[in-house]
Structures are given as structure tokens and as C-alpha cells.
Image (cartoon, grey):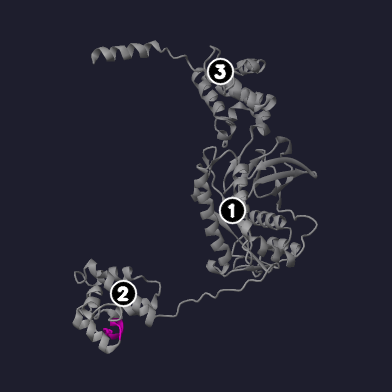
Amino acid sequence: MSNTEKNQEIAASKAGMDPKTARKYLVLNRLPSEVKKERHWRTREDPFSEVWDQVRQQIEENSGLEAKTLFEWLQREHPGRYSDGQIRTLQRRVKLWRATEGPAQEVYFGQTHEPGRLCASDFTHMTELGITIQGQTLAHLVYHFVLTYSNWETGTICYSESLESLSEGWQDAVWELGAVPVGHRTDSLSSAVNNMSNLEEFNRRYEAVMKYYGVKPQHTNPASPHENGDAEQSHHRFKRAVEQALMLRGSRDFVSVAEYAQFLQDLLAQRNAGRRQRLAEELAVMGELPARRMESARRERVKVDSGSLIHVERNAYSVNSRLIGEKVEARVYLDHVEVWYGQKKVEELPRLRGRSKHRVDYRHIIEWLVRKPGAFENYRYKEDLFPTSRFRMAYDALQETAAGRAVKEYLKILKLAADEGETPVDEALRELLEGKTETAITAGSVSELLQRLDTITPVTVVEVATVDLASFDQLCAETAVQQ
């Protein structure tokens, strides 16, 4: 102190210290922090000393109990004894007990990763990011794949944690890589891992995929996501990167799912750009791919019922009425269902998400519906028979203007859509609904318009009325006079 200043008084003043105190520390040759004695006594009485044994018994029996829960319990047990302001005292005491006398906590052991040894994957929910396709919310997940050594990652859009999604996503990843690692780890997905009632560890179909690629499957223990920490942490960083990229883009709306998928692939390519060196180390020791991909579909034999429907995964799909009574093969893929009969694909339908859903195509049943119009009004899947909003509006208009024959006329219009094409009929209905002519909506008027579609003004043509600027001049003149 005295080595840098003229005297001790000046040095002590600059240190914010009394000169006598400064001389004391110089004599002791110790810092203030070294002289200060630790306090081992309480400055006020412990309000929880009488009930601490009860509190300790509770947390010994239930280690997950929080101090706030215990405090509320004490307030109920001892009405009026504890005020809300004393909760921090209990929280500190419980925290001290856990750290000094409580049970040992689970230890997580960091692992050393070797090139090409392991990949990890899982599904991550993306709906919370607010992605829309032409204004409609896209409820979806991403199957997320990561190599644990290089952190190289990729992903596939899917709509459920099904085996088809797992198989498709995993195969997309390894074929993009061009090689396969030794092992693949997932958490305890029901699509991959059997439940406890089954003596076999892995789902047979999932195990068959792994065996086909020569990969050893692994899974974490139930309710232990940290054991698949590479995938879990990668999820978090990936979703944060997507969120940031969406902010830069300035919009969360996409023209199509394909455009959104390309957006994700571009983002993943950017994230993988700095991992090329470690990825090269992995690829050098990874296994070769087989000659071709394994089919991801699940096959199921089903019978076409009298309603021209098949039931797959508790969902109903219509097929052509010619197949009623026949058994067909449904091949369930990640996002679509194929219907095969006699070694020939006869239908390809979008896969329904969830259970107890239905998709009825009017083209499959219109021939017989026209013959049985009385079945339309109370048909269980009636709403599926309005392919666009204009078809629904046309039916409602018919109900108002020709209630007695509304159903028959509408079904004839639907038959025209099946024969001539849905889009042309939709355009003809637009012309009639806009009321540009006095023609009533009937199957005949729609058919007539179909013959001269080239005369209908396209919906993209917008007519803007000419603005008469004289009215603005008059308004300005009147305002000037008033002023």
C-alpha cells in the first residue's frame, strides 16, 4: 500500500478504508478476506426447528417433493403459524439438507465417441414453430438423425411416430450418407421397442430393417431420455436453428410441403458444412449400403366392404366399387397408402393421421349414388362428397331454390365432375354462383358452361373500377372555402 502512495493515509482513503484499519492489515500481513471469521451461528431463531423432523421424514420418503409443496403442507398442518414470507427460509434449509445429508443424485457419465460406431435418432415435434402451408397449420414431426462422433445430422418430415416413419427416415439418412454405422440408438419408441408384455426386445419389423443393413440396434431405458442425449441435444439445437432461420425468412408460410422440406434440407446442409472433416473420419470406417433400399411399407390384407370401403389402422378409405367383396393388399407408407389387387396398384391415397378418420372419394361411388339419391342425405360420410367449397355452396343454393330436386341435381353435378374433371366443373360453378348471368344452378347449366369454358373470366383477372378524380377536386375546394 505504502509502496505506491506517499503515505498510508492516502492509500487507505483510496481503498475506502480507515487508516487504523489499514495499519492493522499491514501488521497482520493478511487480506481482509483472510482475517474474516466464518459465522457458524444463526442470527435469528429457526422457525422450522420444531417441525424439521416431520419435514425431513417427508422428503426422505418422497425425494421429489419441493420445498414449496412442503411449506403449503405446513401451513395447512399449523394454521396461522407460518407466513408466506418464510418460504425462502424453508427452501434454503431443504436445499442445504439435500446437499449435505440427502440421497446421492444420479451421475451422468460423459462418453467417448468413436468414428463410425454409433448413430442416434428420435422424433421431435415441430408444430409449436407455427409452420403453415398456404395458411393452414402443418401439424408434423421431424425424424431427426445424428452421428454421435461428427454430429452430422439430417431429418425427414413425418406425421406420427410409426414404424413406417422410423424406417423411411432412417433409410433416407443412411442413403444420403452413403454408408451405415455399426450401431443405431433410439429411445424406447413403441415403433421400435416392444412393450414389457412381449418377451422379444425389439419389434420384429424394426429388427428386420436393422438386420438388412447390418446394424446393431440399441435403445435407452424407459423414461430416460438423457441416455439418448446426442439426439436430445441435437433436437434442441436443430429446432432453435429452424426458429432463427424462419425469423430471417420473415414468414412461416410455405407454398407446399415440398418447399418446406427443401427449406429444412438447406438449413441442415449449412449446419453440416463445418462437420466435413470429422464426417470424413466416420465415412472411412463405416459399412457399405446394400444394393437397394428396403421397402418401408407395412402390408395388410383387407376386404372391401359393401360400402366400397377398406379399413386400415382404424381409418376408412374408399376404393372403386368394382372391388366390393374382394380382398386387396394395403401397403401403408409414411404419408400414403397404396391399394394393390392382382399384382397391380389400383389406388394411391393420402394416409390419414390419427384414428377413426375417413376419406371417401366421390368418384368411387357416384355411379350408384346417382341411382340411389335417397341415400345421400343421411350418408355417414356425406361431408366428403363436397370436394370444394363451391360444391357445398352449389348444394346449399339448390336447397333454397329447388328443395324437391336439390339432391338429384347435385349428384348429377358431382357425376359431371367425375366424368369431365373436378376443376372445370368448379370453374363453371364459380361463374354461376357469382351471379353474372341469370341462369339457375342445375346440372344442365353446368354442362352448358363446360362447353364454353374459354369464355369464363379467369379468377386471377381482377377488374378495378376507374376512379373519378373530380370528386376529390370538389372535396378539396369545399375544404378550402370552409377554411
Answer whether residue 77 is magenta in the image. Answer: no
For numbered disc 2, what is the local secondary structure?
Answer: helix
Q: What's drawn in magenta, residue-wise?
A: 30-40
Q: For the C terminus, give its image quadrant.
A: top left
Label 3, on which residue? 432
- Residue 319: image x %, image y %? 69, 38
Label 1, on which residue? 142
Question: Based on the displayed image, in which of its 4 quarters is residue 21 positioned?
Answer: bottom left
Question: Based on the displayed image, in which of its 4 quarters is residue 77 positioned?
Answer: bottom left
Residue sitting at x 66%, y 32%: 365
Q: CA distance from mark 1 to mark 2?
A: 42 Å
Choose between 445 and 185: the one closer to the eye: 185
Choose between 267 and 320: the one closer to the eye: 267
Label 2, on which residue? 92
Residue sitting at x 54%, y 44%: 138
For numbered disc 3, what is the local secondary structure?
Answer: helix
Residue sitting at x 48%, y 76%: 106
For numbered disc 1, what is the local secondary structure?
Answer: strand
Q: CA distance from mark 2 to mark 3?
A: 75 Å
Q: Residues within 10 Å of mark 2 (few under 14, many from 20)?
A: few
Prevailing SS of the magenta stretch: loop
Specify which label sits upstream in the sequence, 1 or 3.
1
Q: What's under tag 2, amino acid-wise?
A: Arg
